Amino acid sequence: MEQNTRLRITFAKGEEIKYISHLDLMRVWERTLRRAGVPLAYSHGFNPRPKISIAAPLPVGFMGRAEVMDVWLTRYISPKNFAKCLIPHLPPGLEVLSVEVVYPKSPSLQSLVRSAEYRVTVQGAESREEIEGRLRELLSAEHLPRQRRGKEYDLRPLIEDLWVEGRAEGGWVLGMRLRAGADGTGRPDEVLKALGLADRPHTIWRERLIFGLDK
C-alpha cells in the first residue's frame, strides 16, 4: 500500500508575481517542484496531477507573507532537505518561509481556514481621528449589501475586525481580520470600497491565515 509523506509549506508571494492568478500560481509551484526533483505523489485517474493543495486562493493583485500549501511525496524527505532542494528553483516573488511534516490523513487545509488578517496601506491626508471614524462607522453598520459576480451578499458578517496600525508615507496602514471559508469570504478590496477608499492608491498584504485549530 502506498505511503505518502505530507509536507506543509509556508511561503510568501511578493510583488513580482502579485498579478498572476491562483491557477497560474499552482502551475508555477508544479514546475518548481518538478525542477527540484522531489518525489511528488500524483492523483489517480485519466489525467494524474501532483498532489498539491493551497489553503486559500489569493486574489490577483494581492500579496501574501504567510501563505500555506500542502505537498504530498511518495517517500519521506526531511523538511530541511526539501527546502534545500526547492529554494534554488524558486522564481522571483516566491519565498519558502518554513516546512513541516503533517499527518497524511489530517483534514484538508481548505476545510480548516476560518479567517485571514490583512495589512492594507492606503494613501490619504485624513487625520487618525478621521480614518478611525470611517472604521467605526463601518463596524457599527448592521448590513453592508454588496455585489460580487452579479450576486448580492452582505459584507458586514464577513468583517471580524478593523483597526488602524499606524501612519505610512502619504497615508495610513489599516489592519483587517476577515472571515474566510465555505460560509463566505471577505475581501479587503471590498472593505476599501465600503470605506470609500478604493479609488486611492493602495497595497494589500495577507499577513496571516487563521485555522480552525488556532486559538
Image (tube, grey):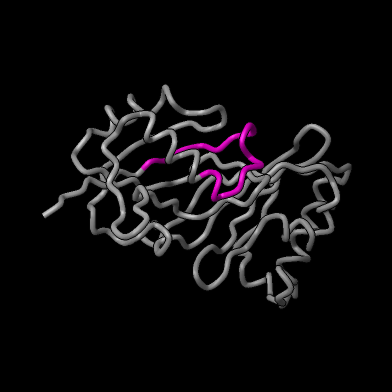
Which quadrant of the view contains residue 137? Answer: bottom right
Give me the residue at 71% from left, 40% from top. Answer: 166
Q: Is residue 1 above or below residue 124?
A: below
* Residue 53 percent location from the top left of the image: 40, 52
Labels in figure, total: 0
* Residue 119 percent location from the top left of the image: 64, 45
Q: Which residues are magenta?
A: 9-25
Left or right placement of residue 163 versus residue 83 in this view: right
Left or right placement of residue 13 versus residue 87 in this view: right
Give me the residue at 19% from left, 40% from top. Answer: 75
Left or right placement of residue 64 versus residue 46 in this view: right
Q: Nearer the viewer, residue 133 or 141?
A: 141
Q: Nearer the viewer, residue 176 or 140?
A: 176
Quadrant where the image shows the C terminus: bottom left
Quadrant where the image shows the N terminus: bottom left
* Residue 20 percent location from the top left of the image: 62, 43
Residue at the outermost left position: 1
Residue 13 lies in magenta, yes or no?
Answer: yes
Residue at the outermost right position: 125
Left or right placement of residue 39 versus residue 9 in this view: left
Give me the residue at 51% from left, 37% from top. Answer: 12
Residue 72 lies in magenta, yes or no?
Answer: no
Give me the residue at 59% from left, 57% from top. Answer: 177
Residue at the outermost top position: 88
Q: Is residue 190 above or below residue 35?
A: below
Which quadrant of the view contains residue 7? Answer: top left
* Residue 2 percent location from the top left of the image: 15, 52
